[in-house]
Image: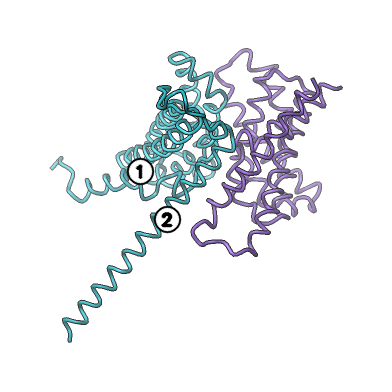
Chain colours: A purple, B cyan
Amino acid sequence: MQELLWIFISALLINNFTLAYFLGLCPFLGVSGRLETAFRLGLANIFVMLITAVCAWGLNTYILPYAPYLRLISFIIVIASTVQFVEMAVKKLSPELFRALGIFLPLITTNCAILGLALFATNKGYGLVEGLFYALGAGGGVTLALVLLAGIREETKVLDIPKLIEGTALNLIIAGILSMAFMGFAGLFSAAG
Amino acid sequence: MNQPTTIERSRTAEEFLKGIWKENPVFVAVLGMCPTLAVTNTAINSLAMGLATTFVLVFSSLLVSSLRNAIPKQVRITTFIIIIATFVTVVDFMLAALVPQVHKELGAFIALIVVNCLILGRQEAFASKNNIKLALADALGMSLGFTFALLCIGVVREILGSGSLFNIPLFGSGFEPWVIMIMPPGGFFTLGFLLLFFNWLQKRRKARQESGRQSTQYEEAREFL
């Protein structure tokens, strides 16, 4: 149980997908203008990550030992079709959630955080339960980073910022400072022994 | 008659050149950020990543461009992704066999070239609509621009973060490396400041063009008088 907790915390804070591995930066910089949308995108991410973790585990255990060169291709096809399937299922089962996630659900296919999750989880040899906790932590970490950046960006809108630095340059520097703050979490592991 | 006309040749050259500077995928379009920041902690890693991306982009563009009339519109994105994933698999195995050290350092980020939005973007926006020659020029230009941008970031980060360039120490033993630059935050900071620099260049060019226009107007007015 403790090990599962560590996998979760490690993916959430210490090896944060966005701020330490630079995964899923496109939505991170693109749609973090508003807190509300950032949060929803984060939720959609967690959702797809959980499903991907199960699929990646299944593929890795039952099919890939026979054809290792199919790893990338099969992962990407599975992710693309999962996203499509999830979109249809959510639309049918819970129109409310579908409306809340909106355009972000289909866009997730090209999000490197999802493929990154599948690759990292199988590289580390995680089983099904471990993979699920890893996905939960990673998704939570992406959401956390998105919400933090969106919150800061909402504040900077009312500030008097030089025209030159506005936009991506400023966002990257804010992200750098956030990333520096998250480096502090690396101490968690050594503190626990 | 087989010689390409001047117009054709200049179009090819233009498609090639635009990716390097005017539409640089990293500094202007801000595409393909994950590899840009994740692997640029040393100049060698940046170069390897740039070359791997070049290989994938050039061959995917060639294939997509030659198949552009055969791919049905409805499934084009899926087709592109599968073509890209195939070439990424090739590059992944190739690097593992040729330069295991670099392959180990880049790790999963080689595989992540599949979801580099730059590559899919070029297939959708260019290769699927143009002939093979133009697609090749575009792919080469874009990947050169991408490699150039990666090298810029990698060189800055390696010099500041470990005081060396391509593993050759630059400073004496008195140099205290700025370790944060080779850690994740350094990637964000370096790219942020480089973008700032490019914004400044662009703004200055625009200002100069405008002042130039004003002065010609002024001269015209004087001649008129």
Q: Residues within 10 Å of mark 1 (few under 14, many from 20)?
A: many
Task: Give the residue furthest to the front.
Answer: B174
Secondary structure beneath dot 2 equals helix
Q: Residue furthest bottom?
A: B225
Q: Amino acid at mark 2?
A: Trp
Looking at the rendering, which quadrant does residue B126 occupy? top left
On screen, A154 above or below B190? below
Decide if residue B76 is in sight here.
no
Q: Say yes or no: labels 2 and 1 on the same chain.
A: yes
Q: Residue beneath label 2, please?
A: B200
Subunit ID for the residue under disc 2: B
Q: Nearer the viewer, residue B140 or A18?
A: A18
The residue positioned 66% from the left and 41% from the top of the image is A84
Image point 76% across, 45% down: which residue?
Answer: A90
Chain containing mark 1: B
Which residue carries the number 1 mark? B20
Query: Residue A133, can we see it?
Result: yes
Q: Where is residue A146 drawn, in percent x and y?
A: 68, 46
Instruction: Check if mark 2's residue and mark 1's residue have beta carbons within 8 Å.
Output: no
From the image, state whether disc 2 or disc 1 is nearer to you. Answer: 2
Q: Nearer the viewer, residue A121 or B219?
A: B219
The quarter of the picture where the C terminus of chain B appears is bottom left
Q: Label 1 amino acid? A: Ile
Q: Is residue B145 above or below residue A189?
A: below
Q: Secondary structure at mark 1?
A: helix
| Residue B35 horizontal side relative to residue A101, left or right | left
Pointer 2 local density, CA inside 10 Å: few below 14, some 14–19, many at least 20? some
